[in-house]
Amino acid sequence: MRQQKGFLLFVLVLELAVLCESRLVTVPDGPLVRVEGQSVSIRCNVSDYQGPRDQDFEWSLITGDGGQDIQLVSTFDPMYTHTSVLDRVESGDISLKKLGEASVELTIRNVRASDSTTYRCSTPSTDSVISGNYYADVELRVIGDTLKVSPAIPSAAVLEGQSVQLHCNASRAYTAHTFLSITWSVRKGTGSPEDILTFGPDEAVRVGPAFTERYADGGLLLDLRGGGVYRMELKEALALDQGAYMCTAREWTRQPGGGKGWQKILEKSEDMGSVTVTPIAQSLTVTVQKNVTLSVEDTLNLTCSVSAGNLTFLGLEVTWLFGAADAPGILRELLRVGLDGQVLGGSELAGMRRVGPGTFRLLLPSVQRSDSGLYACQVKAWLRQGFRGWYQAAEKTSFPVHVLVTRLEPDFKVNLTAPVSPRFTGDPTELLCNVTDIRNVPDGRLSVTWTYGERRPEGVVSGPMTVATVDELGVLLPGDSYRQRLETGAVTAGRSGPATFRLFVLRSRDQDMGRYSCKVAAWTRSLRGGWDKSPERQSLPVTVEWTAQTPLLNVVAHRVREAATGGSTFEMSCRVTGQNIQNPGYSVLIRFVERQGSNPRKVVSLSADSVLQLEEGMAASRTDSVALEKTGQLEYRFRLYGAQVSDRGFYYCDVTAWTRDQSEDWSRAVSAESNKIEITFTDAGPVFNVSIRSDRDSVSPGDTAQIECTMAILGATPNTGDVAYDVRWFQTPLLAMDNGGAVPLISMDRWGVVRRGSANESAEFSLERTDRHAFVLRLHRAHDRHMGEYHCTARLWYISASGLWREGRELTSAPVSLAVSLAFWDSVQIPVLCGLAAALAAGLLSVVVGLISAHWCLSRSPMHAPRNKLIDLEMD
């Protein structure tokens, strides 16, 4: 009984396994709808099968006549195709493509109306148990091309701000499972078409990226009236909406039950035509009436007329401009009316109002002479753009009209005096500009401009320059040349009375001598709330001068230390003597000339504030080679370290005396140059030394030793970097000391070529240059014969001033000793081993000889006869 239950349980598990692994053949859900002449691809997959992984497929179609099966194509039987479709298969119109081991795709390249039927995909069984489905069917419907598109644009030319109607009518024969979409697009210039709006196929609206914001603001409207009538309206057209418009109708299908999305099966596009948008700027005109002549206290009445193609849609911002008659290109805003009709700017005496559509009037009562000038009307036209508000579509300014107002000019007199005049340099100077007999300046203000003309020695006065201006509001405006002195208080300018202006120089300089004058202008309040300036009146000039003492400066240079050889130090001292200079400070510049008459070169300088600066004539690499310092009240010392051949020439001091005023600014007084001190020495080549150093004093046999030979340049060359060396290494062995000989080991010439000596043929020594001035000798596998003293010799080569290599001195380094350490056992092991071997050999030889002798003696003695022979004798 227990065995029967177990068998039943096994059968149940086997049946569940079979059910879980049933073969599954799948094709896309149908029906598949295509337009006649298009291509269709149908994919077939098989899964949950047994047997080989690579499966075969068969495609056939089921006709409506009794479900007849017409064989199309097969992956394993080339003779599978029915004769009725053989020509289409052989031409490639019907083809089968293997996509994988369990997937295949049937393609009909050019579907026909007769292809509308059911298609079956079958897979031969490779399963051990028949289960699942072995074929799947899908319906294909081929429809005709019935889609028609008829676009229209009722008005192809519109004004900016008007709407554009775009009609796109589409019709087709109804077919189940197909849907329609309409797309409006525009091409601007030679660019690609850009989609504006798409409706469908799922009754959704999709907007092009460039029109998203406009659609959200209500600038695009869609009118769906049914019956294949589709209309789109571009509200408030912009100038950039101009272009060629197209309408595209597309027919779509999707699989029942959701499928994998929409599939386009037909598309038709038609040109709707070009739309021209006329900018507002082309139709906008702004005019103001003709020129006007008025008397003082009259009322100015000017009318601005505005016209445009669609004036009722425009928002107007009107601005009245005013400017001087002699500067027609410079107009400033007088007052303005905004979009909301509010008047901005102006004053209580000037106003503007709108008297009709596009008509604005300026009223200016009680005009004055200052109201004379050019008047113009500027109009900005604004258009509403959806919910985003207004945007400026155009701007026009009328031709200015001239308005002339007669009035009495302000009248006054200007007198300039110098209450305080300097007698010497450094004394103060005071000038007063008095305005008298002031008439026709009611509630007016005065401004003054101080000017100065330099008086040169030949008596010519240079053109005037502005010292400072005190405007009608009392604001001080310094001139460019006097800005620093006015900001520090060395020069002051201001008002000392209602009609008196004062210019004061705290400490007069020699360059302050010259002619001074003041120009005064009267300012009267205008009806626009500002101030009008009258013509300026200039005073007679006042000459400020005094007897100036000529400053004198003398500089004497003398040699402190001579540069006798290259690399030595040169030192020069300059002593300064000055006369007629108040509180002087001195700046010193060291100059150098290679030969008399050549152009000088700046070396180093020391400012009057004791700031040291290396000049452009000295290489930056030699910053530490020069020094300039103040060694006394009137003495300066210059040092040049490590003199080179290029430093030979003449050196002298260029000294400038400076004076400081109350503003603590330095002013140049006088300059002088000292006598020249020459540096001259013979170029004997660089001076250098040679040093040697070993990394160890003693090495063990077989180790590597390293000895470094280093050269150091002490002198100067035309170019310190252009040096090279011939280096040779020598060994003085202990065994050769009695003979006083030195064995050459290895050498390297100035070109880097290494040559070995006769004592180094086995490559026990190597030579390496680690930098320009260092050479390293390496001893490999040390032996007792390498003990001794080592030294190196170096011959210097350098590039002379002519650019050729020259041979210099040869120096020999001090010797350095190298010992090879031998341990006691290492020294005696060979003799001990040799002795033991000899003793062992002698012992063995003695034993062999003894054995041979004994054997020979016993064989001949009767006393030592063999025992068996004795026995034989006894028996006898």
Image (cartoon, helix red, strand yellow):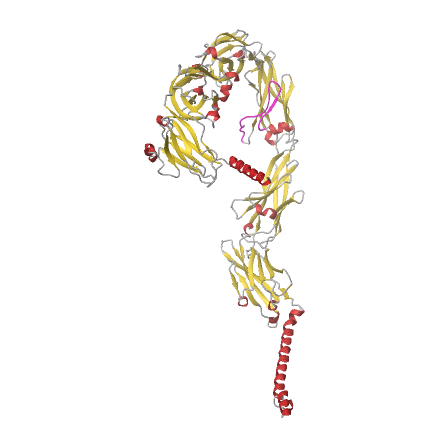
Magenta stretch, overall SS: loop
**x 44%, y 23%: residue:** 195
Picture coordinates of residue 244, whole percent (x, y): 40, 21
Picture coordinates of residue 634, whole percent (x, y): 65, 42
Quadrant where the C terminus is found in the figure: bottom right
Picture coordinates of residue 621, whole percent (x, y): 57, 47
Does residue 467 belong to the magenta stretch?
yes
**Number of numbered discs on residues:** 0
Residue 779 in sight from this viewpoint: yes
Does residue 380 belong to the magenta stretch?
no
Quadrant where the N terminus is found in the figure: top right
Indicate left or right for 152 with 408 as reference: left
Residue 545 in sight from this viewpoint: no
Vertical order, 824 against 309 (above or below): below
Q: Nearer the viewer, residue 750 or 8?
A: 8
**x 63%, y 27%: residue:** 487
Where does the magenta region start and end?
458-481
Picture coordinates of residue 27, whole percent (x, y): 44, 31
Give residue 16's quadrant in the image.
top right
Indicate left or right for 452 with 133 as reference: right
Give residue 741's quadrant in the image.
bottom right
Q: Nearer the viewer, residue 299 or 552?
A: 299
Give residue 846's quadrant in the image.
bottom right
Q: Nearer the viewer, residue 347 or 682?
A: 347
